[in-house]
Image (cartoon, rainbow, N blue to C red):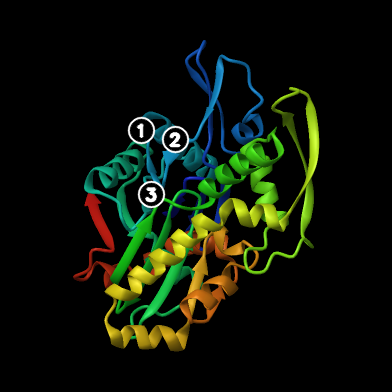
Amino acid sequence: MDIGIDLGTANVMITMGNRGIVLNEPSMIAFNTKLNEVIAVGTEAYKMAGKTPDHITVVQPLCDGVISDHKMTEYMITAFIEKVTGKQLLMPNIVMCVPSSVTDVESRAVIEAAKIAGAKKVYLIEEPIAALLGTGIDISTPLGNMVVDIGGGTTDIAVVSMNGIVAKSSIKVAGNKFDKAIVKYISNRYRVLIGEKTAEMAKISAANIFDPDGSRNMIIKGRHLIRGLPEQIQVSDYDIYEAIIELINEIIFAIKSVFEKAPPELVGDIYNNGIYLTGGGALIYGLDKLIAKEIGVHCHIAEDPISCVANGTRLAFKNIDKLLDGFENVSLYKN
């Protein structure tokens, strides 16, 4: 029983054996402080966000790609594994994804959470490696491939060759930061307070960060900050552009810094092969064109960017011997 877990800040995706992705739910837990118990996990908890009384809190136990609440994370992983295995004590082998900048302490936290959930063995794989595996790229050859994985909490950028990461960068600028920036912008410009769920919908539906022209727009609803009453306004791609372009520029700067660290031979390969965009952030309209313009290298959006890392964890089981042989991209810890 092999289980792959993409433990994301925004979503948890689980793959099992040859069945592919068997679970894709938000990384959220609803906790009743009066009864001191968890009342919902995943999608059910997400539905409660922003709508609960004081004694129920909805939390994301992961922040910026790493565990911020150990107990809640352990409960969440256990609940998800029970959900996909039917509460059978199967003692699975688990591959878990971590950001490329993860520290030893943070790695141990992930490993302990998986062990408590009943794992027999725990393997860690860095997100850029998993993302490239999930896109179907052969990373074992001496050719340079660059991946930019824009998730919920972190953006991981790496140049990979011969099963190893040659140059990398991981920044805490990604989907959640975009949503918060949109909330702040709408609040400052229109004096309307919206929730992060609404901001995420605006990012998906109205964004155009390459050449905003006002053609993409949507109606959003919130509370007027001065009158305190319900309000609805129309936002356009100009608004989303102004809200998040500074954060997008931070990602572009990080991509440039990875090129500066990479050997020139591999940079030449990347110029020929292009840059692969994965993660939910890859779907922001116009992002691939903007990066291509600023970097001067063609960008490919992966076929299913949101699922790339999760599929990579599944494929990692087939490559575990290769990845373990002299590389640090997958680490093995035994009970």
Task: Report if residue 302 is visible in the image.
Answer: no
Kind of element beneath mark 2: loop
Mark 1 is surrounded, within 10 Å at the Cα level, by few (under 14), some (14 to 19) or many (20 or more) other residues, namely some
Camera-near label (3 vs 2) is: 2
The percent position of residue 50, horizontal first and vertical second, equals 63, 28
Q: Are marks 1 and 2 in contact (CB under 8 Å)?
A: yes
- Residue denoted by label 1: 70
Q: Label 2 sits on what residue type?
A: Pro
Kind of element beneath mark 1: helix
Q: Which mark is residue 61?
A: 2
| Residue at the (80%, 37%) spot, across then down | 232
| Residue at the (47%, 15%) spot, across then down | 36
The percent position of residue 318, horizontal first and vertical second, equals 38, 69
Q: Label 3 sits on what residue type?
A: Pro
Which residue extends farthest top? 34
Asked where in the image residue 51 lies, by quadrant, the reply is top right
Marks 1 and 2, the one that precedes in the sequence: 2
Camera-near label (3 vs 1) is: 1
Mark 1–mark 2 distance (CA, rounded to whole Å)? 7 Å
Asked where in the image residue 119 lies, by quadrant, the reply is top left
Q: Which mark is residue 224?
A: none
Q: Which mark is residue 92?
A: 3
